[in-house]
Amino acid sequence: MPDAPYLIAAVVVSAAVTWALRALPFAALAPLRASKTVQYLSSRMPAGVMVILVVYALRDLPVTEPRALAPLAALAVTIGLHLWRRNALLSILGGTAVHVALASTVFAP
């Protein structure tokens, strides 16, 4: 077993590296907050990320089969709820509920 000074040094080095890795993003982002590019990306990225997620989720959907109606109906409900109420939580929960209900009852295998 290693001696006590070695163990203490290992703990101190590990703590310093952990602290530095957690503090580095905040230190690096501070000067970027005033950047026009970062401000532009912060306003445009949420929609872009959602489009990418939708495409990824629906990429293998067999649109010629009836079971494809469950996710498509859930997507329509999610979009409709979001346009109506502008509440992300309500939209996600509503779309999920519709998908689960349709997939487990109407389009159950």
Image (cartoon, grey):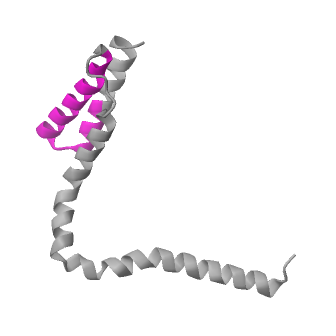
1 or 64: which is nearer to us? 64
Residue 97 higher or lower than 41, as above or below? above
At 27% from the left and 82% from the top, the residue drawn is 31
Which percent across, then down, holds residue 82? Answer: 17, 39
Quadrant hosting residue 33: bottom left
The image quadrant where one finds the N terminus is bottom right
Is 77 a magenta residue? yes
Residue 41 higher or lower than 7, as above or below? above
16 or 69: which is nearer to us? 69
Which percent across, then down, holds residue 104? Answer: 39, 17
Judge left or right: residue 102 versus residue 22: left
The image quadrant where one finds the C terminus is top left
Q: Given the current orientation, which residue lies at the most extreme left position?
A: 84
Magenta stretch, main secondary structure class: helix
1 or 90: which is nearer to us? 1
Which percent across, then down, holds residue 67? Answer: 32, 17
Q: Given the current orientation, which residue lies at the most extreme bottom position?
A: 5
Is 25 a magenta residue? no
Quadrant hosting residue 34: bottom left
Q: Which residues are magenta?
A: 67-95
At 52% from the left and 78% from the top, the residue drawn is 19
Quadrant hosting residue 97: top left
At 85% from the left and 83% from the top, the residue drawn is 3
How many numbered dots are placed on residues in this image?
0
Which percent across, then down, holds residue 41? Answer: 20, 64
Judge left or right: residue 4 versus residue 39: right
